[in-house]
Image: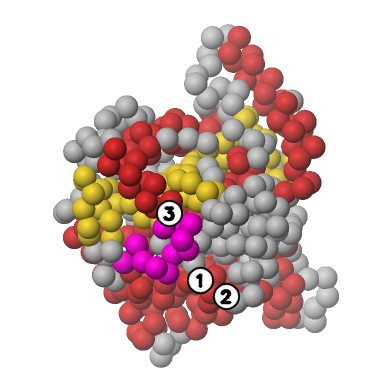
Amino acid sequence: QEYLAAIAAQNPAINGYITLDAEKTLAEARAADERIAQGRGGALTGVPVAYKDIFCQTGWRSACGSKMLDNFVAPYTATVVQNLLDAGMVTLGRTNMDEFAMGSTNESSFYGATKNPWHTEHVPGGSSGGSAAVVAARLAPAALGSDTGGSIRQPAAHCGITGIKPTYGIVSRFGMVAYASSFDQAGPMAQTAEDCAILLNAMAGFDERDSTSLEREKEDYTRDLNQPLKGLRVGLPKEYFTASNSPDVQAALENAKTLLQQQGAELVEVSLPQTELSIPAYYVLASAEASTNLSRYDGVRYGHRAAQFADLDEMYSRTRAEGFGSEVKRRIMIGTYVLSHGYYDAYYLKAQKLRRLVANDFQVAFAQCDLILAPAAPTAAPKLGELNQDPVQAYLSDIYTIAVNLAGLPALSLPAGFAANGLPIGVQLIGNYFAEAKILGAAHQMQ
Ligand code: GLN
């Protein structure tokens, strides 16, 4: 009730939540109370959580930020959501996002932009900007996001909170609306790395309904939280520490370096030479996968359907013309083009090869270090309208996050200082496959 009251008072100014249902929330809360009274509660029982609009949950509208799914009430529940429900967490609502998770500012949402709670003339980042904003504004103690190309880490950084994108395959994608399936991964967003570790414990696990889910033994992601950093080798990729970052971001990176050194970590220079290839590789591959994933929105099975059409072809085209926003259409066109006969080898196949090169860079670097320190974005959160003028400019701002998705690696973003204008700045810790516990431990020590 306390959170619902705060949301009613403060959400209109930031537009972080786009779907609320107090009755459902309070029913879940009462069930949690009962469970605690019966002595069946766990650490998360009764703790409220917000879900990015990309996660399906029975009976809740899950629109993925799109007009196409504005009328879609999910008939089933995503595995991650179910896992948190099983732990007794209480659903607060669904948070705003860029349409189909395509964007870096939240401005492509059909439901209007979310505002950064630190400064409402600025964006919260994207695409999980609603989740980041509601956690930062204390309108949820935790939220789930999804990260295809930085969408957990970049908004977490812009809103001064902590978020982790796990190794590809350890969190189920079942029930999370597909954008680019070989990249998409869900993860927790919260105030601290400790909270993220507790949430990840509840979220992760094998799921036979996700064909890329990994069968691994259950891990305790909190196990390294109190591990001292002495002797930890932290790599500084020379391609990431450049003058193209804003001075505020450079200063935050220096803060993080000092903090690590003070605690006995050893800083080593490493190189990720293929860094600049990651943007063209990502935007070819993610758009290709998006164009096939989004072909299901045809007006026949579910979602929006045009009211007027002469025949079936016109029904398809009008439905899609009306239902999708301009950024989604741009991605579908790019994706269809790079997959088409005659261009497949030149673009799609080539991009797959670049993906391998980018992934190999990290393996060379991890021979020299345990974790990598990196910026989360080249600047603090831009002003509303500043980035969405020019799509290429927006794509370029993903330079520090998307290589991790190309490689399928885990990475976390944590607060590391403030810009001159008062906006928070985050930095990333990137680990090798399955190094979540190590990343979370280092982040906890830095917090
Ligand atoms: N900026 C990236 C994109 O638009 C973010 C994607 C994501 O992580 N969902 O593709």
* Residue 248: in magenta span: yes
- Mark 2 near mark 3, Cβ–Cβ under 8 Å? no
Give the residue drawn at x 58%, y 58%. Answer: 381
Give above or below for 79 relative to 319.
Answer: above
- Mark 2 near mark 1, Cβ–Cβ under 8 Å? yes
The CA distance from mark 2 to mark 1 is 6 Å
Give above or below for 367 relative to 399.
Answer: above
Q: Residue furthest bottom?
A: 342
Nearer-N-terminus badge (2/3):
3
The residue type indicated by label 1 comes to: Tyr
Residue 70: percent from the left, percent from the top?
A: 73, 57
Asked if ligand 1 lies within 8 A of label 1, the reply is yes
The residue type indicated by label 2 comes to: Pro
Magenta region? 239-251
Q: Which residue is mark 1?
A: 395
Q: Secondary structure at mark 2?
A: helix
Q: Which mark is residue 251?
A: 3
Give the residue drawn at x 60%, y 69%. Answer: 387
Between label 2 and label 3, give the one nearer the viewer.
3
Q: Which residue is mark 2?
A: 391
